[in-house]
Amino acid sequence: MNADKDKNAKPPAGIPSQARRVFSGVIYDVWQWEQEMYDGTTATFEKISRPDTVEIIGTVGDKIILEEQTQPDRDLCLSLPSGRADQSEDMLAEAKREFLEETGYESDDWLHWKSIYPTGKVIHPWHFYIARDCRLTSVPSLDSGEKITVKLITMDELLTLADEPRFWVGAQFISDLLRLRADERKKEEFRRLIFGGK
């Protein structure tokens, strides 16, 4: 275990300002603080944080970009282009970087769809972006721990992925897909959103 060398690190949103980082790992940080209990005693509370994640819904014509990928610690899975936002605090810039690196695609039409800020024991914000009318401009530049194949799928195929155990995406997005499947009006609104009203 690596003890944290920066004892004055500032806690991220969702963790009390008096918390102290007691461990800093490759991805996760552990924070602890003393919390007064209802009977006047105190107890040590703890939360874990990790860098924000960006997820991109990229469209090419009337199709959506999907990745088939394997990683050293994971069998074949399906995912949206995504990654850790660990190079800057500009989430749009991070989304564009991850998207280009993983897929080789770029877009001139980006839209922030939503951000999710979980409030449980693990602080892990997710930021969803839509990239419309994408064009292939380069060969993907993958990390040494990534093997990614880009596929183009229909919106209906995306919606069926809510039932696919290998679809590796935030649970909130699975809930979104299920709601869209159950509501034709919302499905059409989402279709217009990601394809630009076409």
Image (cartoon, rainbow, N blue to C red):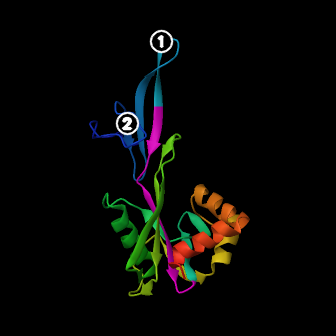
Q: Is residue 142 visible?
A: no
Location of residue 157 (image quadrant):
bottom right
Judge from the rendering whether residue 37 lies leftward or rightward of residue 87; answer left or right: right
| Above-or-below relation of 52 to 141 | above
Q: In the image, is 102 to the left or to the right of 161?
A: left
Q: Report the label total.
A: 2
Q: Amino acid at mark 1?
A: Gly
Q: Residues within 10 Å of mark 2 (few under 14, many from 20)?
A: some
Give the mark nearest the N terminus, 1 or 2: 2
Type of the residue with mark 2: Val
Q: Secondary structure at mark 2?
A: strand
Front residue of this view, candidates 116 and 31: 116
Q: Which residues are magenta?
A: 46-62
Q: Tell me if mark 1 has few (under 14), some (14-19) or many (20+) residues whose alpha carbon lies within 10 angstroms of its own.
A: few
Identify the image quadrant of the C terminus: bottom right
Label 2, on which residue?
A: 22
- Residue that mark 1 sits on: 40
Residue depicted at 47% across the width and 12% down the height = 40
**In the image, is 167 to the left or to the right of 141?**
right
Nearer to us of marks 1 and 2 is 1
Residue 152, picture quadrant:
bottom right
Q: Main secondary structure of the magenta part?
A: strand
Percent x, y of residue 191: 59, 74
Q: In the rendered structure, are the residues bearing label 1 and label 2 in contact, judged by CB atoms less than 8 Å apart?
A: no
